Image (cartoon, rainbow, N blue to C red):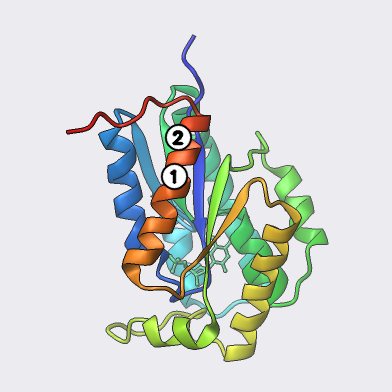
Amino acid sequence: MTQRGRFITLEGVDGAGKSTHIAWLVETLRARGLEVVSTREPGGTPLGEKLRELVLNEPMGLDTETLLMFAARTEHLRQVIAPALARGAWVVCDRYTDATYAYQGGGRELGAARIAVLEQWMQPPLAPDRTWLFDVPLEVARARMTAARTPDRFEREQQAFFERTRAAYQARAGADAARIHVIDASQSLEQVRAALAADVEAFLREAGVPAASAA
Ligand code: TMP
């Protein structure tokens, strides 16, 4: 029987620098012979990408925003994530449900209760096997945000919004330390990469993936 793949997510406030490390992670896993599906939220399916466009750019209320995140997620889970895991592929997802708890629950102050109801609604309910949270002080995140393009609805938010979002992420990590591993992303890119690489190795060992052959 095919062994189920592993579900990995990466999280952090805008500007934490996680995107820089995702391509590296995907390459690293592929180099170990794993089939890897690299995807993102909101998005990951044709409909999900359309919903992403709306939710990042159209003015809307908080309930609508939260429901659209989960509408996109449900499609993503059913069409992409669950089938990939079932056939033995590993899934690396740029943000997932922790982001809703952090941004809508914390940043926008919706709280966790209604998000938990929506999370329960999804079938199959599926938690990541490992989440790496890129944690960074707000000044550093702000300085890293790319000024190259027009900021979206989230990137335009004030400092206090990101402080609440970061705090909500940290609280989730504190409550589920076995799954959510915090990476101090205020360090240099090389230091962050080294911290992540060490933890990725430990995760691969736990998953029974053979060690990399010395080239
Ligand atoms: P990205 O810039 O990392 O691709 O994410 C898009 C934005 O969407 C980012 O500012 C975080 C936000 N977001 C939420 O507010 N709630 C969610 O559930 C997800 C997945 C993303």
Which residue is labeled 2 in the image?
Answer: 204
The residue sitting at 43% across, 54% down in the picture is: 196
Q: From this viewpoint, which residue is outermost toward the right?
A: 113
Of residues 50 and 89, which is closer to you in this image? 89
The residue sitting at 68% across, 52% down in the picture is: 177
Type of the residue with mark 2: Leu
Mark 2 CB near ligand 1 (8 Å cut): no
Residue 110 position in % (x across, y down): 76, 72
Residue 140 position in % (x across, y down): 45, 84
Is the residue marked by circle 2 packed among few (<14), some (14-19), or many (20+) residues within 10 Å? some
Q: From this viewpoint, which residue is outermost toward the left?
A: 215
Location of the C terminus (image quadrant): top left
Residue 52 position in % (x across, y down): 46, 63
Q: Is residue 116 above or below residue 121?
A: below
Q: Quadrant of residue 64?
A: bottom right
> CB atoms at circles 2 and 1 under 8 Å apart?
yes
Type of the residue with mark 1: Val
Which residue is labeled 1 in the image?
Answer: 200
Q: Secondary structure at mark 2?
A: helix
Cα distance in 3D space between marks 2 and 1: 6 Å
Q: Is residue 192 above or below residue 43?
A: below
Of residues 172 and 152, which is closer to you in this image? 172
Of residues 179 and 187, which is closer to you in this image? 187
The residue sitting at 40% across, 87% down in the picture is: 143
Of residues 146 and 72, which is closer to you in this image? 146
Mark 1 CB near ligand 1 (8 Å cut): no
Q: Is residue 199 above or below residue 61?
A: above
Q: Secondary structure at mark 1?
A: helix
Residue 43 visible at all:
yes
